[in-house]
Image: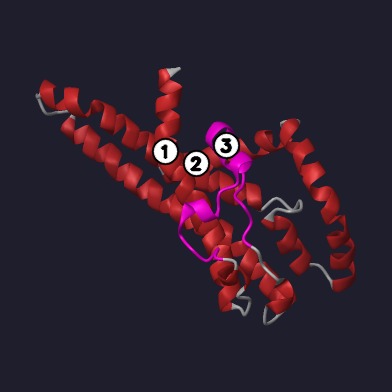
Amino acid sequence: MLDNIFEIVWSIPAVLIAITFHEYWHGRMAYKLGDPTAAEAGRLTLNPLAHLDPIGTLMLLLFRFGWAKPVPVNFNRLNHPKRDMIYVSLAGPIANIVIAVIFALVLRLSYHFIGQITMVQSSSFFNLSVTMLRGWLIFLQTGVIINLALAIFNLIPVPPLDGSKILIGLLPYSQAYRYAKLESYGPILLLILVLSGIIGKVLFPIVFFLFRFLV
């Protein structure tokens, strides 16, 4: 029980970083392409409290996939709505992939550093630092996994995830219109996919393959 609490506590900063940068870059990209809606709503910020969705954040902590509170985007205010919709939707997942790579690089360096200090014959050093080292590694490992999971999960083409908006931007207008009309059913379909375990069975093998590749 205490181990689980310890892991959750050290995972929280990694989760906050992942969801904050995901939503911030949606809003930043929209702003660059002509839509200031996120800025007007006070969401063009790196303050994680502005982006937290309680259920989605809990899902990320416990199950390693979830969501943040979506940044408001008015696609009609974009310079080129159909094309720019793709860029805005991709911005969040790409930000997570970049951050996952940064976490992975720091984790590799940390493994090397810890491997070096384990050769030091000083038990007092380890008595004082072993807990912090373990927590640091949990933070970094979670940072890689959470960011990869958030990126891949959001690329699933099911509304309201980013993948559905990317697909709408890629489809011809007639097909995009018909697909967009299904958006009201998206959350129900997404819930079914999550509760049935289908998403987990597809998502986690990809995430852990990429984790091993990066680390």
Using the image as rendered, state which of residue 210 and residue 62 is in the foreground.
62
Give the position of the C terminus as an image quadrant.
top left
Residue 136 location, quadrant: top left
* Magenta segment includes 59: yes
Q: Nearer the viewer, mark 2 or mark 3?
A: 3
**Whether residue 98 is situated above or below residue 196 in the rendered picture:** below
Q: Which residues are magenta?
A: 42-71
Can residue 148 be seen here? The reply is: yes
Q: Is disc 3 surrounded by few (<14), some (14 to 19) or many (20+) residues within 10 Å?
A: some
Label number found at residue 204: none
- Tag 1: amino acid: Gln
Q: Which color scheme did the rendering employ for the protein?
A: secondary structure
Left or right: 140, with 207 as reference point? left
Image point (54%, 56%), residue name: 22
- Cα separation, mark 2 vs mark 3, equals 15 Å
From this viewpoint, which residue is outermost toward the left? 121
State the residue position of label 1.
141
Residue 141, position as x, y percentages in the image: 42, 38
Left or right: 102, with 192 as reference point? left
Query: Dot 2 lies on which element?
Result: helix
Q: Determine contact: label 1, label 2, CB under 8 Å.
A: yes
Using the image as rendered, state which of residue 132 and residue 118 is in the foreground.
132
Query: Dot 1 lies on which element?
Result: helix
- Cα separation, mark 3 vs mark 1, equals 18 Å
Query: Dot 3 lies on which element?
Result: helix
Q: Earlier in the sequence, mark 3 or mark 1?
A: 3
